[in-house]
Each structure stands twice: as C-alpha cells, then as structure tokens.
Image: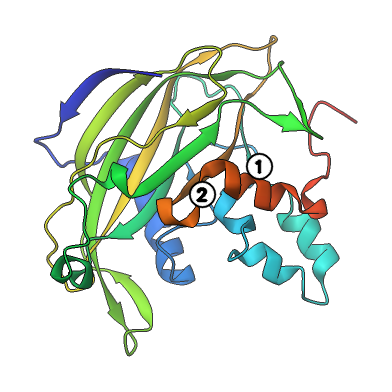
Amino acid sequence: MKVLVFLLFISTSIFAEEKLEFSELIKIVEKTNKSFINTIIASDRDELLKSVNYYTKEGDFKKLLKEPDRLESIDKWGDRRRWFVSKWQGKEPAIYVSASYNGSYDLEHNRQSKDLKDDYLFYFKNYCEFDGTIDERYARIKKMMLTYYDAPYTAVNNMMNIKIVGKFKKIISYDIEVKEDEKIINAMQSFQPVKSTTWYGNIFAIQLKVLEVYPGEPNMLLCTSDYYMGYKGWGSYEKVLSEIDELPELKGKRNPYVN
C-alpha cells in the first residue's frame, strides 16, 4: 500500500451529501451509545453492511443468538460482512467508521498517545470470499482516499448516553494506492489528537472513499469485506477474525452470483 498524497485541510467544509452521511453516523452513535459503530454507514451499497465489531465476543450478534428469535436474527443480520457496490455511475462510493478518544481521564493520567495510529486498528479485506474461497470475479479497490473528521462529545441522561455536541470537521486526508496483490489492508493512518473541548473527549470518523478499482469480470460488483475499527488492546485483526470465523451462523451463502 502506497500513500500518494498527504493533505492538511485548511477548510472544514463538508459537501451536502456528506452532511447526510454524517447525520446518519451521528444517529447511530447516539442511538447505540457506541462510538465504534456496528452498522457501517455507506454512501452506496447493495446490501446491509455490518462491521466485524458486530460479531465479536462483546458484539450484539452473539447476544441475539441467545434470544428466542435467533433464527430470524441469523437471517436478517448474519453474514453481513461484505460491502457490495454496483456500478456507481461516476460517483465515488464511501463508507465510514468511528471511535472515541481524548477523554480528560486519559489526559490527566498521560495515557493519550501523540498519534492515534499507535492506539487504533483499522483493517479490511480487499476481496470477498464465500465458504472460505475467494471469489476473483469481483472488482477490488485500487485507489482510495482516507479522510479523518473530528467532533467533541459529552454524556447526557445522568451520564448514561453519548451526545455529539459539535459538527464533524475535516482534519486530514490521505490518497492511497493499493497494490493488486494486497489482500489484507492496514488502513489506519497517522492522526494527531485534537484538543478536547469537553471532559469526555472527541469522536473521530474515517471516511474511506473509493477512487479507482481493479476490475473483475464484466459487470461484476465491487466487493470488499470485514471492515474493523478497534483498540489495539483488543487484539490483532487476525485474532478478532478467528473469533468470529468460528461462528457457524456466519457460514451462509449470500453470493448474488451463486444460486
């Protein structure tokens, strides 16, 4: 993976369509009370997309499997780890992941790093597989832009619920070229903490925008998978994947081109 361009944004303007996407991100963060979102916001997608976080030991999917309607939950939410995007007609599709940081407790105890790349993981697979076999027919990411946004947050309802109190602002952006044979993408880039204006800290969001693809077979979708944002202390990406790959409920076939 090669970082082609490094840009520091002076302007903090966000386009109208991005405002809608950030508004959806804020709704999910505040509704689920989690800065590590499970349902990934996407500007374009063919099917519902869940992050790897949803299926981990602490995620909501394993909790649903203990409920009486587990079969319905598996049908609705199981195996939703792939980002399918049809021909986007000139638009550059994007997804968003997010995480909180920079709380006053960490600052007071000198636990905040100078670069969030040292604390966080952001990974994905630049391919899709079904029943353990990679499907080579799909398009894959060739060039992408990662843009980091930041907003302060606080807690309401007796400090029980997250509330984002400011607008997301552009901080920094990277243009990245992905090699054709790169399968697992370590996408987290350097990001220096923004000074906190609340006791609770900030939430940063990463927008991954696809600029160019390696084409697959004619008329085949873009397909990438297993997007994950997490603390390094939670374990490596490989460890997290091994934890969810053992779930038999994620073995269903959902390949649109296989009957």
Q: Is residue 243 above or below residue 174?
A: below
Q: Is residue 37 above or below residue 199?
A: above
The CA span between labels 2 and 1 is 11 Å
Question: Which amino acid lies under the numbered mark 2 shown in the image of this protein?
Answer: Ile
Residue 220 has which mark? none
Q: Residue at x 74, y 53 (%)?
A: 78
Q: Nearer the viewer, residue 43 or 114?
A: 114
Residue topped by disc 1 = 47
Q: Secondary structure at mark 1?
A: loop
Residue topped by disc 2 = 40
Q: Quadrant of residue 73?
A: bottom right
Q: Residues within 10 Å of mark 1 (few under 14, many from 20)?
A: few
Q: Residue at x 51, y 15 (%)?
A: 213
Work out which residue is located at the far right of the displayed protein and give it: 259
Q: Residue at x 21, y 42 (%)?
A: 170
Q: Nearer the viewer, residue 211 or 241?
A: 241
User: Is residue 98 visible to us here?
Assistant: yes
Q: Position of residue 147 (x, y in %)?
A: 29, 36
Q: Quadrant of residue 165?
A: bottom left
**Sooner in the amino-acid sequence: mark 2 or mark 1:** 2
Placement of the N terminus among the 4 image quadrants: top left
Disc 2 + disc 1, Cβ < 8 Å: no
Q: Quadrant of residue 56?
A: bottom right
Q: Position of residue 35 (x, y in %)?
A: 40, 61
Question: Which amino acid lies under the numbered mark 1 shown in the image of this protein?
Answer: Glu
